Image (spheres, coloured by chain):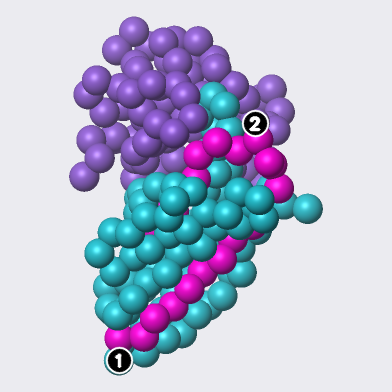
Amino acid sequence: RKEVEQDPGPFNVPEGATVAFNCTYSNSASQSFFWYRQDCRKEPKLLMSVYSSGNEDGRFTAQLNRASQYISLLIRDSKLSDSATYLCVVSGGGNKLTFGTGTQLKVEL
Amino acid sequence: ETGVTQSPTHLIKTRGQQVTLRCSSQSGHNTVSWYQQALGQGPQFIFQYYREEENGRGNFPPRFSGLQFPNYSSELNVNALELDDSALYLCASSSKSGAGETQYFGPGTRLLVL
């Protein structure tokens, strides 16, 4: 079983749609959780950290369920510029980041 | 941009050769982590350097080695290259070595092994 599992997609959605990505992780000792965004042939960039209480940044909302070892990302009012691969990331001690394989999002006109 | 730079941007090698990749961390950062990203996969942790010492290693063979210099820049060395080493190699810097510290990635080095 992979340490971090994501649906690879692609998710093809129209502009303005709401889309949700899910992720599960296997290590119950994981301490920190993130969503990174990666554009084609570019480096990953931090989108947002994920907290147990849930957190929101503009059109993006992230949720963490430690009991179920489940992380989610909700994108509202999708824009063309949101097209990218979204990587679910967990971290244990020592700052090693463990990435999922990524979920590809394509926002269309 | 993150301020993390990597060189070279692209590299072509043949099986059995050796390669050295370089990374300059963001100003004020003392921790550098290296990741390998194969096509269609997420980045995989290779190792981390904190204040010039290796501080954690992923599931990579000993032919993957590294260094960190007093200015906190870092090198990744790969000996006896194999075809499966073809990947994007990413370095990331952070201000501390600890869970939760944001890591900032460089643009990566694309390595092709023929």
* Side of B51 where B114 appears, left or right: right
Local crowd size for mark 1, using a 10 Å CA cut-off: few (<14), some (14–19), many (≥20): few
Same chain check for tags 2 and 1: no
Which residue is pictured at 56% across the width and 66% down the height?
Answer: A22
Towards the viewer: A19 or B108: A19
Which residue is pictured at 50% across the width and 39% down the height?
Answer: A32
* Side of A81 where A32 appears, left or right: right
Instruction: Tell me which amino acid carries mark 1.
Output: Leu
Which residue is pictured at 35% across the width and 18% down the height?
Answer: B30
Residue A109, numbered label: 1
Q: Secondary structure at mark 2?
A: loop
In the rendered image, which quarter is residue B29 located in?
Answer: top left
Instruction: Tell me which amino acid carries mark 2.
Output: Gly
* Side of A72 where B94 appears, left or right: left
Q: Find residue A93 and report its horizontal and vertical position in percent.
A: 57, 27
Towards the viewer: B66 or B99: B99
Q: Which chain is cyan?
A: A
Vertical relation: A7 (above or below) B78? below
Which residue is pictured at 58% across the width and 33% down the height?
Answer: A92
- Disc 2 designates what residue? B58
Q: Which chain is purple?
A: B
Local crowd size for mark 2, using a 10 Å CA cut-off: few (<14), some (14–19), many (≥20): few
Q: Find residue A24 and report its horizontal and vertical position in percent.
A: 64, 57
Protein chain holding label 1: A
- The answer for how far apart the CA atoms under marks 2 and 1 are is 42 Å
